[in-house]
Image: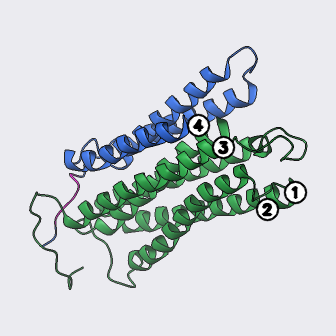
Amino acid sequence: MEQKTSTHKHPNYLAVFIALAVITALITLVEMFAPNPVIPKVYLNTFYVVMSVLKATLVAMFYMHLKMDSRIYTALFLIPAMFALVFVFMLAI
Amino acid sequence: MSHSVHPAPSMGLDNRKFGMWAFLASEVLFFSVLIANFLSLSKLDPPGTFHGVATGRELLNIPLTALNTFILLTSSFTVVLALQAIQNGDQFKMRLYLLVTLLFGSTFIGVQIYEYYVLIFVEGLDMSSLFGASFFTLTGFHGAHVIGGLIWLVILLFKAFGVMGGFSPQENLGVELFGLYWHFVDIVWLLLFSLVYLI
């Protein structure tokens, strides 16, 4: 029994790609040209992490179709991600 | 796919797709261990471990890695375009985009091999240092996942070109499952770029 897994309604993949590319360029430029002594490193690091999580969210929502697909997949992906976050904080911070 | 048996889904979900998401969930935990390992160990090397720089991170080539990140991002984009193409019944575009994905994925691995070569043989990064060991373990496992994806993609291309069946607007789950894996590998790299190279 075959099952269609997509409604064939596609988001604007090009817009998502442009957003991802712009964010990548932005954090690279900030890292290369930001005046480190003026902007404390902790602020820069927070900026990098927030931007990375934003990019990962865009990919998961639109490229992996979590925004349109069953919420069960979202839960299956997010629950271990939450555990992973706690795990990383416990060991690394 | 016509000769295989797929049990009826019990939650209204395709079992194969559910299985892929469960696999990706396990991969989240796998990479979280490696990331925690890197973050906790990479800054503990004693002074003087690295030649001429204070930390191993200063040896990393940020512009080159940013370019490589863009290459992997672009390969993710071409995968969704391939899926969109086959769902619209366009076999030519699906094959084209999958081939472009193969090209970009191979380029990513090529750049990573070059980066490793420079770090080890030009910069003299000690692989047995805490930074070196945790860096190569983390990025190496990610690279291995990309290589695994490329092997999968080659098999997918055989099918896309009709060697082992083919895809259609009705049956294209193979492309979608590969896309899920490839996007996940992309997500991991987006996080690594910040956590390993920038922080």
Which mark is drawn over residue B122?
A: 1
Q: According to the image, label 2 marks what residue?
A: B117
Does mark 1 fall on the same chain as mark 2? yes
- For marks 2 and 1, give the CA distance: 7 Å
- Mark 2 falls within which chain? B
Residue B184 x/y as whole percent: 43, 53
Is the C-beta separation of discs 2 and 1 under 8 Å?
Answer: yes
> Left or right: where does residue A33 sit relative to residue B160?
right
Is the C-beta separation of discs 3 and 2 under 8 Å?
Answer: no
Seen in the picture, residue B100 relative to B61 is either above or below; the reply is below
> Left or right: where does residue B98 sit relative to residue B44?
left
Which numbered disc flags the more N-terminal residue, 3 or 2?
3
Q: Residues within 10 Å of mark 2 (few under 14, many from 20)?
A: some
Query: SS at mark 4?
Result: helix
Seen in the picture, residue A38 relative to A59 is either above or below; the reply is above
Query: SS at mark 1?
Result: helix
Which mark is drawn over residue B66?
A: 3
